[in-house]
Image: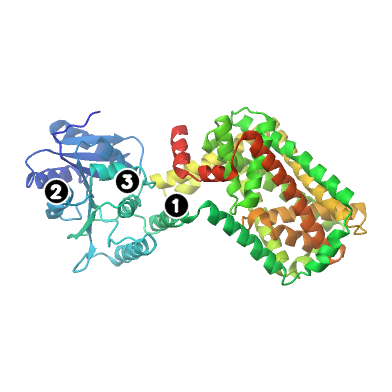
Amino acid sequence: MERQTSVEVSVVLPAYNEADSIEHTVERTLDALGAFLDGGYEVVVAEDGCDDDTPEIAARLADADDRVRHVHSDTRLGRGGALERAFRAADGDVLVYFDTDLATDLKHLEELVECVRSGKYDVATGSRWFPGQIADRPAKRGIPSRGYNELVRLFLRSELRDHQCGFKSFSREAFEHLSTRVEDTHWFWDTEMLVRAQREGFRVAEFPVEWTAKGDTKVDLVRDVFGMGSQIIRTWWQLTVRPRVTRRVTLTAGALLTVLALALMTQYIDFGAVVTEMRQAEPMLVAIAAVVYVLSWPLRGARYRDILAEQGYETNVGFLTGAIFISQTGNLVFPARAGDAVRAYVVKLRRGIPYPSGFASLAVERVFDLLTITALAGCVLLGYTATGQTAEIARTVTGAEGAGRVAVTVASVVGLAALVAVAAIVVSARAETNVVRRAIHRVSTDSYADYVADVVERFVGDVQRVAGTRAGFGRVGLSSVLIWTLDVVTAVLVLQAFDPGLTLVTLVSVGFFAVSVGNLAKVLPLSPGGVGLYEGAFTLLVVGLTGVSYPLALGAAVLDHAVKNIVTVIGGVASMLALNVSLTTAVDQSADRGEIDAEVVQDD
């Protein structure tokens, strides 16, 4: 709808269950505007999914006075979401809003409007914490507010004193520019608008206002303060850290992490002895191990095909195997498992699979991986328990030091987390009520909580969709077992290449246990490719359970990991050439949250 050029100033009143006060607030606002403006203004009631009589009252007011408009929402959008929607619907070039409880004295309204209307500023905001004009607030509200504003000033380099005062104005140009960059839709919306306005070079005015606390705040001082704290961290990362995380910085950081891990290992490892052991490994068995590992990759592609098929996307195994090769190569090169995002980019680029579906399929794959690895380790542990070797395992773990102990600890935590997550998913799937949303709503019922619930439900729903049919679960589960069995066989062959003098039963059992724990240990992205953690867990368990020499076990661990990484890199390079995909470009593109967020909106 084309904007009415006769309206110069639009005042938006965010209203959630304000039936007792909205009529009075609208009347007071019209009077205040009329005192200094000769027409050309409107009052927009941004009614945000109310469950009282606010919608009916707002509609009646709009029918009775053409200066009043009612913007209705059936569902809660959140404070920021409601304001943004109403501002877009408003007709004025100067966009104003203040809280409907009129905590800020309306005698300041003219200054708020004229700061922007005069063209002197692009954004204006009242301040309760201006020197000499400190608001009298109860301690339970004043102390968190002061602390919050100091955190914003510190982390987000804001020059303002009060970011949450509900008394602000924007030029149409500033709003339309900033609103495309602001991500929060609830209480942090104000802060993010002001912070980004300063970063983008807009002129921002802050002036003192008289403010009186009215009734109970709708801000939950535990839930929302912590929520806004997380938003401070998110915005700090986006504005301060991410612009500096260039391709060169990422590669350098990954290299330094790997070098640091290796440097620390030299403090307690005799690498001369390790190299000597590696030179004695049987080349033929190492080559066979590499071939076995290569065979696991088409299985990975087939499993990923089955996962995507359950989500409604059909594609071929060859392409998906290449996409997995590329993403795993990215995980070896870049820290923090950035390669996982690369796969979502590749399937989006070449097969048009939306980003949300790509990331969801990755999450499903990870759940099956963790569950399979944990199950394999658990089965071997049961075997050791049945043969009376539990005490030996306990001594091995408790007596460990350095990387080995860290790795086993990480593996235990990850394995337990995987079991708890799967149990929660199963319970949620079998429950008649929505377990996820009900649990989150015990903490909060606002739009921010609903957003979190939607994200969690989408993840759980995708896992349940794959596991919901016996055929789908069977295919993905069986291929997962085969994939990780071949991974173990590769390690067993490499270990046998060192001629450790172990029986076949011992070799296989310790291989399954050590490889499973090692893979659980490297799930957390503490270094590119899990360098250090995998070797630490593998070596610790092989030495403790078989009594072979430390250099031999570590040599096998290093060579096993090297064989797998070399196969991955070769396959990744070949796949990049075949699919015409640049790894660094893929990482850059997959990190573009704006495009990903746009896809989420389109899918929803």
The answer to whether 435 is drawn above or below residue 249 in the figure is: above
Give the residue number, with chain letter if any, for mark 1.
443
> Tag 1: residue type?
Val
* Residue at image point 11% right, 45% down: 33
Q: Is residue 315 left or right of residue 19?
A: right
Q: What x and y, as percent, mark residue 136?
A: 22, 65
The answer to whether 426 is drawn above or below residue 167 in the figure is: above
> Tag 3: residue type?
Leu
Which one is closest to the eye, mark 3 or mark 1?
3
The residue tagged with tag 1: helix, strand or loop? Answer: loop
Name which of mark 3 and mark 1 comes first in the sequence.
3
Q: Is residue 521 left or right of residue 455?
A: right
Name which of mark 2 and mark 3 comes first in the sequence.
2
Q: What x and y, as percent, mark residue 131?
A: 21, 68
Which sits in the foreground, 490 or 68?
Answer: 490
Q: Is residue 389 left or right of residue 407?
A: right
> Tag 2: residue type?
Ser
Whether residue 598 is visible, yes or no, is: yes
Q: How far is disc 3 from disc 1 in space, using C-alphas? A: 31 Å
When asked about the image quadrant of residue 236, the answer is bottom left
Which sits in the foreground, 342 or 421?
Answer: 342
Which one is closest to the eye, mark 1 or mark 2?
2
* Residue at image point 72% right, 33% down: 475
User: Residue at the bottom extreme?
Assistant: 267
Give the residue number, with chain letter if any, for mark 3.
178
Tell me the crowding category of disc 1: few under 14, some 14 to 19, or many 20 or more residues within 10 angstroms, Cα based.
Answer: few
Q: How far is disc 2 from disc 3 in space, using C-alphas? A: 20 Å
Give the residue number, with chain letter if any, for mark 2.
118
When asked about the image quadrant of residue 8, the answer is top left
Q: What x and y, as percent, mark residue 285?
A: 88, 49
Tell me the crowding category of disc 3: few under 14, some 14 to 19, or many 20 or more residues within 10 angstroms, Cα based.
Answer: some
